[in-house]
Amino acid sequence: MILAFESSCDESAVAIFDPVRGIAGEWIHSQISLHAEHGGVVPDIATREHLRHFGPLLEKARDCGAWEAITKVAVTRGPGLAACLAVGTAAAKAVALARALPVVGVNHLRAHAWSPFIALHARDPAVFSPAIEGLLPHLGLLVSGGNTLLFSIGSDRRIERISGTRDDAAGEALDKGAKLLGIGYPGGPEVEKLAGGGSPTAFDFPRGIGKRADLDFSFSGLKTSLRYRIQAMPESEVRARASDLCASYQEAVVDALAAKTRAALQLRAYRSVGLSGGVANNLELRSRIQAAAAGAGAAFLAAEPCHTGDNAAMIAFNAWVDPDDCARFQGSAIRVDPSAQL
């Protein structure tokens, strides 16, 4: 049984994972409403909220009936906001010390990489090991506000980074696009809502790096293109055509992500394709990546909506499914690593 803490940004989260049953319980406190007033995450506010809410979350975990069976503690060590990571690390070490339990540090991005497999384990924990063997090698697309990258998980469960973004992440581009259009924070979901009533071909936005052989992403030019487009339009027209602008802008993001995924699938035979990260909740993106997987004859695995954002369940699951990597970051020597990579 693994108790996990997640505090990389603006979500305070605690979860307990049971290898025999799956997620025994998970509790989360979201700060979105506080940061929405500022149009983005304010580190000082995020840190303060972590300090306020980890105590109450742990009280809920203690009452779930699995507390006494916990045998290990896991905590996000990075990447993320340094002060926020430090709060989670301090809480995890305190519990581990009080219970005389081992504590391990987990890479936040690697946890996202494994998150599409949580539901597979939950369906039948007893056959998870042979089931996952039939899904490797695996191609994963991680898309969030801070990261956009393609990676592979080999038959030996080792993760290798294939490509990433050279500038903005896809989620960041969606959020900043929403800010340019004045439609609120977090912007990605709002863009998707408005896009549903618009035409994805109404405006022609750039796709970043177009070379098929180059699997890197780039979204800074897309954001700049939207700003120039809006500046060239009367304010009344921007409001009237907000749905078309959102649909076309979202299409540029989704099309770039899908195109690079299809290109990666042509370079190697994969048995499964995964989608994770906050932007994985976008229905158009899910549909396009699922279609890419089907075209390559691969199974499609998407993280459950409750496990796409920052959550502790994926931290606990990663500590169980990839123990060799976590063993490198064990004990009192755990340090936060804000700039950690996959």
Image: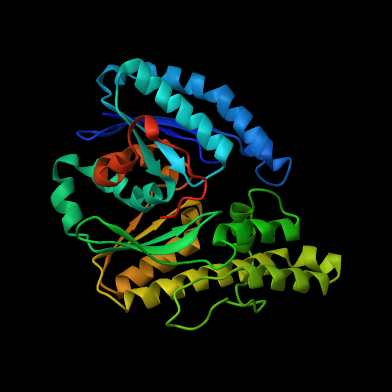
- Residue 87 image offset from top left, x and y in percent: 52, 30
Specify whether 206 is left or right of 263.
right
- Residue 28 showing in the rendered view: no
- Residue at image point 47% right, 44% down: 78
Q: Quadrant of residue 307?
A: top left
Asked whether 314 or 194 is in front, the reply is 314
Specify whether 258 is left or right of 104.
right
When the figure is inspected, residue 89 is found, relative to residue 219, above or below; the finding is above
Q: Quadrant of residue 94?
A: top left
- Residue at image point 68% right, 64% down: 243
Asked whether 10 or 189 is in front, the reply is 10
When the figure is inspected, residue 100 is found, relative to residue 199, above or below; the finding is above
Question: Image quadrant for the N terminus?
Answer: top left
- Residue 195 image offset from top left, x and y in percent: 62, 63
- Residue 154 image offset from top left, x and y in percent: 24, 61
- Residue at image point 67% right, 58% down: 176
**How many callouts does the rendering have?**
0
